Amino acid sequence: MFKSKAKFSGNKPAAPKSGPKNRPVNGGRPLSSRAQEDKSAPNALIYKPNYISAREKEEIFNYLNTLYPIWEMRYSKNNPPPENQKQRPLLRPVYWLGNWQFACLNYYHPPKGIFNRCVAAEGFPPILEYLIQKFEEMVHAHYEPRDIPRGWHLNTCLINYYGDQIQDDGKKLDCARVGEHKDFEPGPVASISFGERALFQFVSSQGTESKSNVVVQQWLEDSSLQIFAGDKFKKHLFHRVQRVDRKEDSHFKLNEISNFETRRINFTFRYVPDEHIVPFARLPEEAKEDVRGYMEKLAEHSEYFKTQI
């Protein structure tokens, strides 16, 4: 087992050949032509292929086998769909650690959308605490202080399961993508990926009526680490997962979800100020009503969530 906040006694991931001040990007491999033209890309992006060791990956998957992801709906009784939109499920099952941002509570979106959106959730297992410590050390060595907010630490994690929805007639609907968006949580974002590689793109966008322009793109491969920060990549550009390959025949079974075939799993670590994380019991009554069903479902397999309801 991995020990929280302690030195790892096994084989550590290979150290980069160049020091942090050299700011390597993409593990020495070429980025897309657009990325090569973008001279600022190496200053704000870190990509390390094969960063997660075989032993670490095994420990992570042992932990994943204990989780029961849920499939949320986008809206709720007290947060109905906007005009001309319909209620819909999310594209994929999810699980959150640290704090849970239920879709129907509209996620964390400062400066105004900060209260009653991040519900206290289970903590990180030792293997993730160990990795998070390394990510945070890497961030402080690589980025300028202006890119790291006061108090920043990676205290929330979204686990996304990418793959195919299995329709009632048995046909598969590919949902392995994420539309362009921004991560509004302040400060650097880190992610690790497993399974099939995914095409991750930073794009400039003028709105839904115009075509987005790809500025930087990167294939995120199995066991890779990506970190991005800075105003350009956090505030000015959007990012998206354009597609996920099918070349390695990767399949991950999910507990109690039979109508989804997973071929990629991604952990995205972000920072939510501690004062904006609220226990379920302190949510407003309408918000409690909207997420109680999810909390009860989670409590079926989680001792932590049992204590919250």
Image: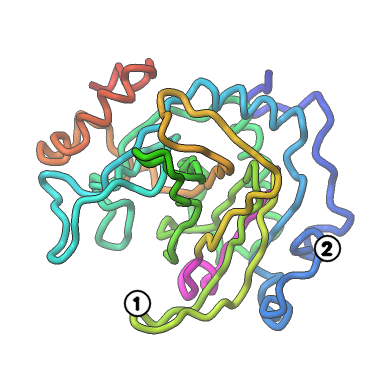
Q: Quadrant of the N terminus?
A: top right
From the viewer's perspective, tell me whether residue 17 is left or right of residue 137.
right
Could you tell which of marks 1 and 2 lies nearer the N-terminus? 2
Type of residue at label 1?
A: Thr
User: Which residue appears at 52% of the width and 46% of the height?
Assistant: 269
Marks 1 and 2 sit apart, C-alpha to C-alpha, by 35 Å
- Label annotation for residue 28: 2
Q: Nearer the viewer, mark 1 or mark 2?
A: 1
Instruction: Give above or below for 162 relative to 209.
Output: above
Of residues 125 and 31, the one drawn nearer to the viewer in this rendering? 31
Q: Residues within 10 Å of mark 2 (few under 14, many from 20)?
A: few
The spot of residue 214 in percent (x, y) is: 56, 77
Q: Is 10 a magenta residue?
A: no
The spot of residue 232 in percent (x, y) is: 54, 74
Instruction: Give above or below for 94 relative to 103.
Output: above
Q: Residue furthest right?
A: 17
Q: Which residue is mark 1?
A: 208
Magenta part of the chain:
223-239
The spot of residue 19 in percent (x, y) is: 84, 58
User: Which residue appears at 28% of the width and 37% of the height?
Assistant: 278
The spot of residue 5 in percent (x, y) is: 64, 29
- Residue 139 shows in the view: no
Q: Is 238 a magenta residue?
A: yes
Type of residue at label 2?
A: Gly
Of residues 64 and 242, the one drawn nearer to the viewer in this rendering? 242
Of residues 221 and 52, the one drawn nearer to the viewer in this rendering? 221
